[in-house]
Structure formats: C-alpha cells, structure tokens
Image (cartoon, rainbow, N blue to C red):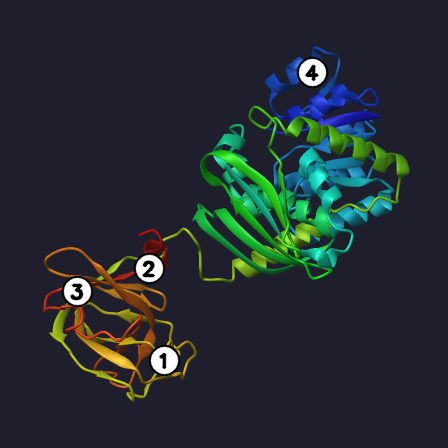
Amino acid sequence: MKLGVVGLGAIAPYFLRAIEADPALTLAAVCDLDPAKLAQHAERGVRVFTDHGALLAAGAVDALVICLPNDVHAAVATAALSRGVAVCCEKPLTITTDDAAAVVDTARRGGAVLFTAFHRRYNRHLGRLTAELPADPSMIASVLVRYHENIVEHTGGEAWYLDPRRCGGGCLIDNGPNALDEARFLLGDLSVTDATIGDVRSGAEFCAEVELVSAHGVPVRVELDWALPTGEVKDVVVQLRDGRVLRADLLAGFDGFKASLEHEYRGILVDFVDAVTRGGGYRDAGPHVVGLVAAAYAIARAKERRPRMVAKYEVASFVVKLLFHSRTDRAMTLSRWPSRCIPAGQIHELVTTTDRPRAAGDRVDRVGFLGFTQFAAPAVVERGDEVWFVPGAGGSRRIGQVAGFDECHWPNHYNILIDSEELLTAGDIDLRPGDEIRFLPAPTAENR
C-alpha cells in the first residue's frame, strides 16, 4: 500500500517510522508547507508536495495519513475520500459534529475507508487490562481515565495546539479523544452526563473533567490536565464490584519521552491496513468521539464554574457595629439571588446559620448575629464565598461560607447568611469594631 503523509509536525515522525517498519507499506509522498521538512524525503526518492490537492491529483497514493492541525482535518479528509483514497486521520476526526457527519457521508459515497487514529487503544498495558475485565459488565463498578501532561512539552513548537480556533478548544478536544476512546475501547459506546472545564488561558482550557455512562450503566470519569509542571500521568483504573482494582499505567516500562508511542503507532497502521483490506465493513469510532467532545463542551461551557480560576477580587469589609444575640425562630427567607453587587460604602448585616438553606424560599430560623460590616470598595458577594475574620491583632479565622441573602430589611441592608458549623455572634469570636471581614472566591479558599 502506497501511503502519503500530510503534515510533518510533531506527530508525523511516529507514523513515518511505523511505515518504514512495515514491509507491507511504502511511503510514496509527503506534503508540508516547510521546504526544509520536505528536502530530506525528496533526497530519498519520495514525492514531495506543498499542497494536498496536488498530491491527490497526482494519483501517487492509495491512502492518506493526516497529521495536520485539527481545524483542517475535515477539508483534507473530504478531498481524499471524494477521490476514493482511504484516510487515516489523527484525532480528533473533526472539530464539529456537522463536519464529522459530512466526512462520513463523503467516505460512504466515495467507497473509501475512514479511520481515526486513536493511538492509546494500541497500548500494550491497556490491552492487558482489557483482557482482565470480567465478561459481565455489571461486575464493573466504575472506570477512571487520567490524561495529565504539560502541553508545552508536547507541542513540538507548534503554536496551533494553544490556539482554540485551530485546535477547537484545549485539553478536552486535544487529549480528550484519546482518553474517551480508552474508556470506549473498554466499555463500548458512551454518553456524557456532566462536564467541567477550567484553567482557561486565551480561550483554551487547561483542565477538564467529564462524567459519562456506558450502555450497561457503568459510570466513567475522565480527568484531563495540560498543566502538570513536568512529566505525564496516563492511566486507567477499573473498580470492580467485588472490591478488586484493575489498573493500567500506559507509560510503565517505556523509558524516554513519548517512548510508548512507537508501538502504538505501529498498531494504528496494522489496523488501518486491515480496515482498508476488508473494505466497507469498518465502522470508525471517530464520529462518536467527536460527539462526546461536543456534548461535553455544551455542558461545560454553559456552566459558570471554572475550576483553578479566580473569577473575582477578594472582597474586604470592616466591622462598624457588633451584635451579640442568637435565635432559633428568626424566620428569614433565602433570596433567589445567588449574588449581590454592592456599591462602595454600603453596610450589610452578617448572620451565621446552621440551617443549611439551599433553595430559594428556604426558611432560616437558627441564626447568630455577628454585626454590620461596611464595604469600602465596590464588590460582588456570592454564594460559595468563604468568609474570614481578620482581627486587628493579626491572624485569621474562617467563619463559614456564604449561603445567600435575606432581604427582609432591604432597601436598608441585606442579611448576608453564612453557613457555619455553629451559631456565632460577635462575642464568640472576639470581634471588634474596625476588624476586617474578607470574602474570598471559592478557588482562592480551596488553595488556602
């Protein structure tokens, strides 16, 4: 089989070495915009091109390997498939589900095989884990897939990885397809139930968590991280209902950076050749995984929460009046508003409670009154903020977490309701006029 490789970036060398190692394959053509990358291949008699259309028009290849930025996968795959040229495309197959459907339709009409290269499914440790799984899926309690790395170490100097317009996002669309395919390889088709993205930098997320479920009801958690200081964590943990734990460390025994990829990319080409040989019976997993990524983004991008990010300033206020009483029959009501914008100079009341109000309209009876605090600068206070007392003598003490607001005294002031372990008043924490009360956004509080 005569293969062409389009894109000679960070991933192409693994394909090129896999082609060279397989006597059934011939590298017939390469395509890249960089003449320096083409020169070494031209010297070896391989046809070189700077345009994929010209490569296809030359009729030099039976199949095309696509190692390009994510945003051009669809166009190049479509061009090849429409000519009846089989395609092996780096993950993700496409950025959008519409593009994935169009590429699949082109493959069907052109009678050519479409194959997405999920290299981790060929990892020998994952293969061993697959063989150890019980035949009855109901014996599996849960699956965890972790894919953590420092993305800067993996880009090979290619800036498009960190450009969400070209990559399609960040770690969810770049590392996500491999991690999702690992779970799918173990359990079959999956559906997304929840997702969160965070640590967003210039539009690209550097961490993500995806919750899924298999057709047999097995819960799956995928954790993605682009921001390890250095090194990698690539593993799968399967919890069985009998208490046993099965684990595959995909990097174990492979010395050197990306050393595991050598045997994985050889596996890709073996299966690709087999799919092309068998013809139309091959069902590519690429479109399904594109759908999982799209579903995860739809959920995650609609959420306000972004883990590992500080979304607002810490808020400082100063006690102007103390209160010392508590009650168990106050009959406050949790406001429907999760946040309040507070102009500079306003004064609001601090009220601790052990009632744990959560839904709008919840009654709050058990309360302890701390006092009134003045906000020196404009501020936003919201549910989940950590509330800390900073006495004039120094040190600090956590009071609790903002549960919400009661508006019974508005427009004079709000009661800021604070979830606390016990009812606290000014006397219980030695609060003094002039002491500082801080409201810290949740990510900051988690890092204290």
Element marked by disc 2: loop
Q: Amino acid at mark 3?
A: Ala
Tell which circle, 4 or 2, labels the residue nearer the N-terminal end: 4
Distance, label 2 to label 1, CA atoms, is 20 Å
45 vs 315: above or below: above
Q: Nearer the viewer, mark 3 or mark 1?
A: 1
Judge left or right: residue 223 versus residue 364. Answer: right
x then y, percent, for residue 255: 58, 24
Amino acid type, label 4: His
Indicate left or right for 274 with 37 as reference: right
Is residue 137 among what the camera can see?
Answer: yes
The part of the image, by quadrant, that contains residue 119 is top right
Label 3 belongs to which residue? Answer: 376
- Quarter of the image for the N terminus: give it: top right
Query: Comparing marks 3 and 4, which lies closer to the viewer?
Result: 3
Distance from disc 4 to disc 1, alpha carbons, whole Å, reads: 69 Å
Nearer the N terminus, badge 3 or badge 1?
1
Q: CA distance from mark 3 to mark 4?
A: 68 Å
Pair 4/1: label in front? 1
Which residue is drawn at the image coordinates 87% and 42% (left, top)? 111
Of marks 4 and 1, which one's residue comes earlier in the chain? 4
Of callouts 3 and 4, the N-terminal one: 4
Q: Are marks 3 and 4 in contact (CB under 8 Å)?
A: no
Residue beneath disc 1: 335
* Label 4 sits on residue: 41
Decide: few, some or many residues near mark 4? Use Cα within 10 Å; few <14, some 14-19, many ≥20: some
The residue type indicated by label 2 comes to Pro
Does residue 54 show up?
Answer: no
Q: Which residue in the structure is indicated by mark 2?
A: 441
Q: Between disc 2 and disc 3, whose residue precedes?
A: 3
